[in-house]
Amino acid sequence: MKKIVVLPLLITSLTSFGFSAEKYDTKAFRTVQKLCTSCHGTPFYMAKQIDEDDWDFYFETPGKLEKIHKNKPEALANLKNSLFQKRKKRLLKFFIDNSKFSGAVNGCDANFCGTVH
């Protein structure tokens, strides 16, 4: 009798943990933290500065990000970085999901507080 009750509880708890473990794309978060934090601050703070339409405009308009960062050699190097280029779509989705009017209020989740240590 105990096995009949314990097994479904175990399956349910493991499944729910899997869905709740990741609230945001950690690869995109880490990429932003590595490449952009020195100038723009924490990833969630950076994402909240503008709304989703602006993020879409900056990422989808060819040369727009480069034009904005033209006077910052370190930023231009980061934009040309293969890691940035490879994860560009992922970064855009992260910024849109956490943008100004997205309703997402992410903070410290015991894994990342958004600060560089």
Image (cartoon, rainbow, N blue to C red):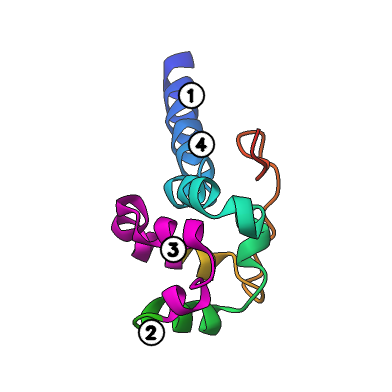
Q: Secondary structure at mark 2?
A: loop
Which of pointers 2 and 4 indicates the residue nearer the eye? 2
Helix, strand or loop for the magenta stretch, by majority: helix
Q: Which stretch appears magenta?
A: 64-92
Residue lying at the far top in this picture: please name it.
2
Q: How far is disc 1 from disc 3 in space, using C-alphas? A: 58 Å
What x and y, as percent, mark residue 56?
Answer: 45, 80
Query: Mark 3 — residue?
Result: 76
Q: Are marks 3 and 2 in contact (CB under 8 Å)?
A: no
What x and y, as percent, mark residue 77?
Answer: 41, 57
| Residue 33 or residue 6, whichever sits in front | 33
Q: Are marks 4 and 1 in contact (CB under 8 Å)?
A: no
- Residue 1 in sight: no
Which of pointers 1 and 3 indicates the residue nearer the eye? 3
Which of pointers 4 and 1 indicates the residue nearer the eye? 4
Amino acid carrying label 2: it is: Thr
Q: Are marks 2 and 1 in contact (CB under 8 Å)?
A: no
Query: Mark 1 — residue?
Result: 5
Q: Secondary structure at mark 4?
A: helix
Q: Secondary structure at mark 1?
A: helix
Amino acid carrying label 4: it is: Phe
Query: Mark 4 — residue?
Result: 17
Q: Is residue 40 magenta?
A: no
| Residue 26 or residue 73, whichever sits in front | 73
